[in-house]
Image (tube, grey):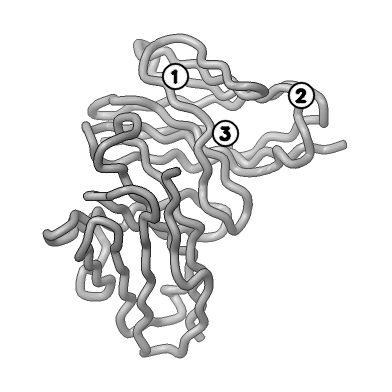
């Protein structure tokens, strides 16, 4: 079966750094995506990892370890607008479905 | 680039009626589109995979006769909720894969359709 785990909720302070973890156990692996979703809106793409290591993109970075089935999303210099749900998704078959985790609700407080 | 639109963005209907939701890829061709539903504070649940020119593939537990999917062109897929009931009220999101480009497995999401069945 397919299983993707993320923490349900996290709270962090404006200006701080937060790390959202994702562990996965899937029947195949063709890449891992992180999406941001604000309430009532569609998910928007944040990052993609297919090889081990860190991908940096402005205030957002994502890390992948395929041997451990583990990824994290790192958000730096948190802003209030970063309050959203963050979804970890794994591409398990070439050109086919994404399997989504339940999402992590991040609340940024001032 | 890679813009996906949905129409309508929200709809309210009476129980027993049917509702059609359109999903369009505006600047790319999409041989594969996906339909998800999402309940409040929950993640996306894949309902079906829609392939241009062929029958959709439904996930386990999704009634194909209730959720009719048509993918008649490379830029349009439609989801029709037939004989809608209040329990069908949800946020429906479509996504599309670019036929020629994109990372393996990458999907571009539409803005979603909020369906409320009275």
The quadrant of the picture occupied by the N terminus of chain B is top left
Foreground: disc 3 or disc 1: 1
Looking at the rendered structure, which numbered label has been put on residue A7?
Answer: 3
Quarter residue A51 falls in: top left
The answer to whether dots 3 and 2 both sit on one chain is yes
Looking at the image, which is closer to me, B7 or A21?
A: B7
Of all chains, the one bearing label 1 is A
Q: CA distance from mark 1 to mark 2?
A: 23 Å
Q: Are marks 3 and 2 in contact (CB under 8 Å)?
A: no
Residue at figure coordinates x 44%, y 26% from the top left: A48
Looking at the rendered structure, which numbered label has been put on residue B91?
Answer: none
Specify which label sits upstream in the sequence, 3 or 2.
3
Q: CA distance from mark 3 to mark 1?
A: 13 Å
Q: Are marks 3 and 1 in contact (CB under 8 Å)?
A: no
As drawn, which residue projects farthest toward the left? B54
Looking at the image, which is closer to me, B63 or A51?
A: A51
Relative to B88, does residue B28 appear above or below in the rendering?
above
Looking at the image, which is closer to me, A87 or A69?
A: A87
Instruction: Please rate how many residues cluster around mark 2, counting C-alpha atoms within 10 Å: few if below 14, some from 14 to 19, many from 20.
Output: few
As drawn, which residue projects farthest toward the right? A110
Q: Which residue is mark 1?
A: A70
Relative to B5, does residue B3 appear above or below in the rendering?
above
């Amino acid at each position: 079966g397919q299983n993707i785990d993320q923490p349900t909720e996290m709270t962090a302070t404006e200006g701080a750094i937060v790390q959202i973890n994702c562990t996965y156990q899937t029947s195949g692996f063709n890449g891992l995506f992180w999406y941001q979703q604000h309430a009532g809106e569609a998910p928007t793409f944040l990052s993609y990892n297919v090889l081990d290591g860190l991908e940096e993109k402005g205030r957002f970075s994502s890390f992948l370890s395929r041997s451990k089935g583990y990824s994290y999303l790192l958000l730096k210099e948190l802003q209030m607008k970063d309050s959203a749900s963050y979804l970890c998704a794994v591409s398990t078959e070439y050109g086919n479905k994404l399997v989504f985790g339940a999402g992590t609700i991040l609340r940024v407080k001032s | 680039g890679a813009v996906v639109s949905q129409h309508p963005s929200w709809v309210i209907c009476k129980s027993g009626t049917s509702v059609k939701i359109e999903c369009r890829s505006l600047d790319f061709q999409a041989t594969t589109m996906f339909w998800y539903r999402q309940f409040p504070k929950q993640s996306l649940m894949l309902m079906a995979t829609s392939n241009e020119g062929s029958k959709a593939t439904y996930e386990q537990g999704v009634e194909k006769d209730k959720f009719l999917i048509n993918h008649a062109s490379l830029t349009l897929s439609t989801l029709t909720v037939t004989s809608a009931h209040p329990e069908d009220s949800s946020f429906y999101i479509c996504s599309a894969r670019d036929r020629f480009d994109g990372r393996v497995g990458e999907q571009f999401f539409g803005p979603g359709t909020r369906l409320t069945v009275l």
